[in-house]
């Protein structure tokens, strides 16, 4: 795991915890808070992987067919 992936994911987890605490203070049912947390963590993992994946170089363009 790269350090940028870990930092991104840690920040997203802190955000999710804050949102869950806010939902609890607003009186949302715990089951729905859990559903929201699971969905947000999935989105966080997907976006962390997308942001931190290595860019693939473009293929060489010397042999193009016409």
Image: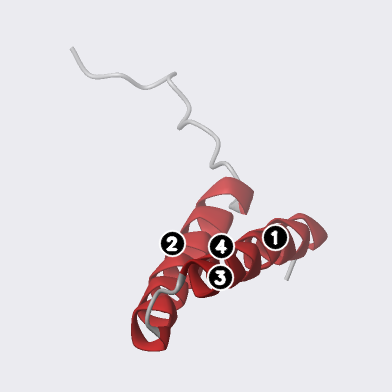
For the residues labelled 2 and 3, say whether their Cβ atoms are less than 8 Å apart. Answer: no
Tell me what residue is drawn at x 60 percent, y 71 percent. Answer: 21
Which secondary structure lies at badge 2? helix
> Which quarter of the figure is the N terminus placed in?
bottom right
Q: CA distance from mark 1 to mark 2?
A: 14 Å
Labels 3 and 4: the sequence-earlier one: 4
Badge 4 crowding class, 10 Å Cα cut-off, few under 14, some 14 to 19, many 20 or more, is some
Say which residue label 4 marks. 19
**Which quadrant would the C terminus be assigned to in this image?**
top left
Dot placed on the residue nearer the N-terminal end, 4 or 2: 4
Q: Residue at x 36, y 79 (%)?
A: 35
Q: Which residue is mark 2?
A: 43
Label annotation for residue 5:
1
- Tell me the distance, in whole angstroms, between the alpha carbons under discs 3 and 1: 30 Å
Q: Position of residue 62 (x, y in %)?
A: 44, 18
User: Which residue is labeled 3 in the image?
Assistant: 25
* Percent x, y of residue 10: 73, 66
């Amino acid at each position: 795991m790269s350090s940028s992936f870990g930092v991104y994911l840690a920040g997203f987890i802190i955000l999710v915890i804050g949102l869950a605490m806010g939902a609890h203070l607003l009186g949302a049912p715990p089951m729905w808070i859990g559903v929201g947390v699971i969905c947000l963590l999935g989105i966080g993992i997907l976006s962390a992987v997308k942001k931190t994946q290595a860019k693939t170089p473009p293929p060489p363009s010397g042999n193009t067919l016409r």
